[in-house]
Image (tube, coloured by chain):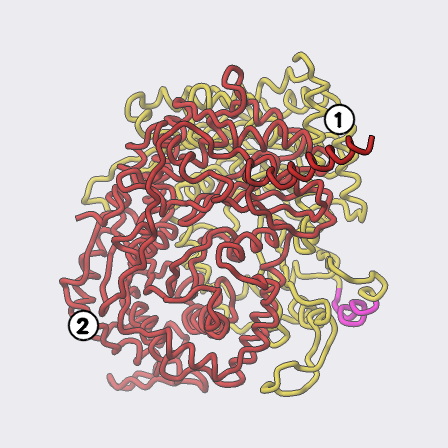
Chain colours: A yellow, B red
Amino acid sequence: MSRLGTHNNAWTWFDVTFYHPLTFTSNLAGKPDSGKHLRAEELPGVLQLESSRFKALDFTEKIFKTETGAVLGEYRRNASFPQLKMSEHLYALLFPHHPYGHETIGYYQDVLDMPNHYDAAVKFYDTYYRPNNCVLVVAGDVKADDIFAKVEPVYADWKAQPVPPIQATGEPPKKEQRERVGWDADVAPLVWVAYRMPAFKPGTTEGAVAQLLNELLVSPAAPLYKKLRYDKQTASQLGFEEGTQGFESFDPRLLIVGAQLFKEKHAERGPAYFDEVAGDIIAGLDELKRFSKQKDAKKLLETLKSKYRYDFLAGLSSPADIAQNFAWYYRFTRDPEVFEKLLQSVEKLTPKDIDNFARTYFVPENRAVLTLAYEAKPAAQK
Amino acid sequence: MRTHRTLLLTILLTLTLVLPAAAQTPKVVTLDSPAPLLNIKVMVKAGSAADPQGLEGLAYLSGRMLVEGGFGDPKSPVTKDKLAEITRPWGGGAYPEVDVTKEVTVFSMTVPKEVLGTYVQQVLRPLFTQPQFAPAELDRIRAEALTFLRSGRLEQIELLGLIALDNVIHEGTSYAQPDIGTEKGLDAVNAEAVRRFYATFYRPENMVVGVSSTDPAIVSQVQTALGGAGKLDAATFTARSAEKPAAVKKREVLIVALPNAISTGIHAGFPLPLTRADKDYWPLYVANIWFGTHRDSFSHLYQVIRADRGYNYGDYSYIEHFEGRPFSLFPPTNAPRRYQYFSIWIRPVQSDYALHLMKALTWELENFVRTGMSDEQCDLAKNKAKVLYLSLGETGERLLGYKLDDDFYGMAPGYLDGYLKNIDAVSCSEVNAAIKKYLQADNLKYVIITDDEVAPKLAEAISAGGAAWGKAPADYQIDVKDEGGQKTYLVPEGKLDLLRLDAAWAYYPLDIPKKRIKIVPAEKMFETSALPK
C-alpha cells in the first residue's frame, strides 16, 4: 500500500467497521512501480490488496498482542474525557442484555486483558468478515462496468458463510433510569438525557423523522437550544452526544441529548441545577408531541426539509464523503437508491408524523437521565 | 443627442475611475467550481497574536461577536436567533462559522447559489458592515469560552499538551497563548475593546475573500458587500507585531500535572526558521513524511513506537503547526503562521514508560539527523506525499481554503497547485541536506502531560540521568529459559534489532538538570500568557 501511495485508515462503530483507503484511480488495478530506486516489478493494485485483507488476513498471535498495546493507547487517550465514563454507564444501563451495552473499544479492564484473547479475534474475523456481510463501495472518476470487471476476479474466491444475527439475551429495562456519575477532576458538570429509539431503516417515516431530530432539537434555531444556550444560559454546550449516528443502527439504540453546564452555577445551586436542565431537555422533547399544533407547523416543516436537502448535498463534497455516506445508509436495506429513498421519505413527512414519533418514543419508560459532577476524592484513595 | 452621449460616457468613465478609490473592496481569490453550493470565506488578517497585552482572547471574542452580537439596523438588529432563522432553509453551512487562529480570523459560509442575492443582502453585507456588538452577548460568549478553557485543560489532555508545547516554544511572544485567550485576558475584554478591534482590523484592505466561483457577477456581489467593513467610530489599536520566537538552548522540560491522568503524553519541539513559502520547505516536507506523517502507519516514529512495540495509539512529527489535532486526520486550512516550529507528538503511554519514550524520541531524532534517508526511503516518502494530495485537496472548501493561505504566504503558484510538481522535483540529496540544515535534537523543549503523583517522580528520574527501560523481552513474547538462575533469552530472528534499539534508547543521556524541569498543575495553565510560577 505504501509503495503504491495509498492512504489507509479505518474506524469501528457499534454495528459496522469501515475501511476507507484513498488512492489515485490509476492505482486501482496493478501497475509498474514508479520510483526509480524501488524494484521495478508489477505491483498488485489497491483492489487486489484490499481483497486480501478481507479474504485471508494473516495475523500471528505476536502481532495481535503488539497491536492490543495500540488499542490500550487509544483507550488511554480517551480516558480523560468524562464523556467516556458517562457513555460506559449509560450503555450498560439501557442495554444490559445486548452488545450495544458496551463501548466499541470495550471497558478498560477488557482492553487490558485483550492480549489474552487472540482466539476471539481470529473467530471474530472468521465469522463477520464474509462477502455476504460486506459492501464494497468505489467512488471517484471511474466507470461502473470497468470496476465490476476488475473487482469480480479478485473477490470471486471469498467464501460466503451465514452470519449469526446478534441477539439480545433479555428485555431492556421498562422504567426511567437515573444515575449520578462522579468524576475526579474539577471539570464542567454534564447532564445527559437519553431515549431508546427504534431500529433505523432508511426510507421509512420513522427513519425520516429521525433525520430531522437534530434540527428540531439542538440546532441554533431550535427552541430547546435557544432556551438553554441563549435565554436561560444554563448550558455552555448542547448537542447530540453521538450525532445522528447513535440512532442510525440495526437494532433499536438511543438518542442522547447532552448538555455541558457551568461549574459556577453548579457550585451555587447544586442538584437543583441538574434537575432544571434535565427538566428543560425533557420538556423540549415533549414539545415535539404537539409539533403539528403550533402555528405555521407546515411552513416550519418545509423549512426543515429544505435545510435537510442542502445539508445532505453539502455532505457529498468529495469521493470519500460520498463513499462513506453511501456505505453508511446502503447497509440497512441494500438498496442502491437509498439516497433517493431517504430524501423522498423526508419530503413526504407531515407535521403529524413528528407528533406520532415523539409520542411513541419520548416516553418516560424509554428514558435515562445521567449527570456528572466533580467529586473530590480523599488523597488516600487515589 | 450626440452631446448627451458624450456626457454620459464621460460620467461613466469618471465613475469607473473613481469608484474603487471611494469604496475600497477587499482582495478576492476565486476557485472555479461547478458545485451548486457556493463556498465563501472571509479572511481577516488578524488573529490571537494581535490581541493587545492583557486582553488575550479579544480576537476570539471579536470573531464570535461579529456573528452572534447582532448586526444590521440598530433598531431591529439581526440577532443570533434571527440569523439562525434566516439561514435555516439554506442548510447549516449558511450560518457563518468563525475560526480564530494566531494570525487570521476566518469566516466560512456555504450558500446555495440560487439564494446568493438574498444572502448578501440579509447576512453577508450587514454582518460585516453594521455589527452591533451587544454587550449581553459578549458576557454569554465569554462565560462559554472560560468554561471551555477551565474544563478543557482538565479533560482534553492531548489538546492541552499540544497547546502547551506551542506556547512554550513561543514563550514571551504574542503566539504564547491559546487562540481562545487566557482566563485573565477574557475577563478583561469589554464591548468597547471589541469595537476597537473591529475598527482596527476588520477593514477591506486587511481582508481577503475567497469565493468558489469565477462568475464575475457572483464575485463582485460578494466583494462589494464587504466594501464598507470596519467603519466605526472607535479608537484603533496599534497593531502588535508578531515576534520571532527565541532559539531554544539545550533541553528543558515542562511537566503539566493532572489530578486523574492514567497515562502520560509527550511532546517536544523547537522553532523552525522556514515556512511553506521557502524553497527548502519541500525537501524538509518529504523528510518529515518519512519520519512522522500524522496519523499514518507509514511513518518511522509510528513504526518503531506503535507498530513494533505497541506503546500507544500513534507517534508523529510536524514541520508546520497542525491545527485541528487531536481529531483531524489532515491539516485544516486557514491557520497560516509567519513563524513555524518543528515538533514531535508521542500520544499517551503508560506512565512507567514515559522517560524511556522521551529518550526514544530524542534518540530517533538525533539518529535521523545523523543518518538521513536512503534513496529508497526518499522515493517511498515522495510516493506517500503525493497520495496525501488527494486528501489535502479533497473538497471545494479545502481548495478554497488553500487559496486564502496562499495569499497569506504570498505563494504563486499556490501550495496545492505546485504540490505534486514540487515533490517530484525534490532530490534525495536535497532531502538529506534539509534534514541536516534544519533538524537537531540538542536544543529541545519538552512538554509532558501526566498525573500529579507521577510528575515529581518523573522529574526526579529525568534529572537523575540513569538508564530507563521500557517494555521487557517478555512483553515482546520472547521466551526466557531459566537454568539455575542463569537466564537465556531465546530471541527469534528479527527481534534482536528491536532489543538493541531498546537498549540504545534506555541508555541515551538526556542531560537535563533539575533546574531545567518545571512542574505546573493543569488547573493553573492559561491563567495568563506567561507560565504559572
| Residue underneath mark 2 | B465
Tell me where residue B384 sits by quadrant: bottom right
Nearer-the-camera pick, B419 or B368 = B419
Q: Residue type at mark 2?
A: Gly
Q: Position of residue B144 (x, y in %)?
A: 39, 32
Question: Disc 1 versus disc 2: distance between alpha carbons?
Answer: 69 Å
Q: Residue type at mark 1?
A: Leu
Q: Quadrant of the N terminus of chain A?
A: bottom right
Nearer-the-camera pick, A173 or A256 = A256
Label 1 neighbour load within 10 Å: few <14, some 14-19, many 20+:
some
Q: Are marks 1 and 2 in contact (CB under 8 Å)?
A: no
The label on residue A349 is 1
User: Residue shown at 40%/38% (left/top)?
Assistant: B200
Establish whether labels 1 and 2 are both on one chain.
no
Q: Position of residue B451 (x, y in %)?
A: 26, 52
Q: Residue furthest right?
A: A145
Q: Is residue B338 visible?
A: yes
Q: Chain of mark 1?
A: A
Label 2 neighbour load within 10 Å: few <14, some 14-19, many 20+:
some
Q: Chain of mark 2?
A: B
User: Residue shown at 53%/74% (left/top)?
Assistant: A60
Q: Is residue B94 magenta?
A: no
Q: Is residue A225 visible?
A: no
The rendered magenta stretch, by its main secondary structure, is classed as helix
The span shown in magenta is A149-159
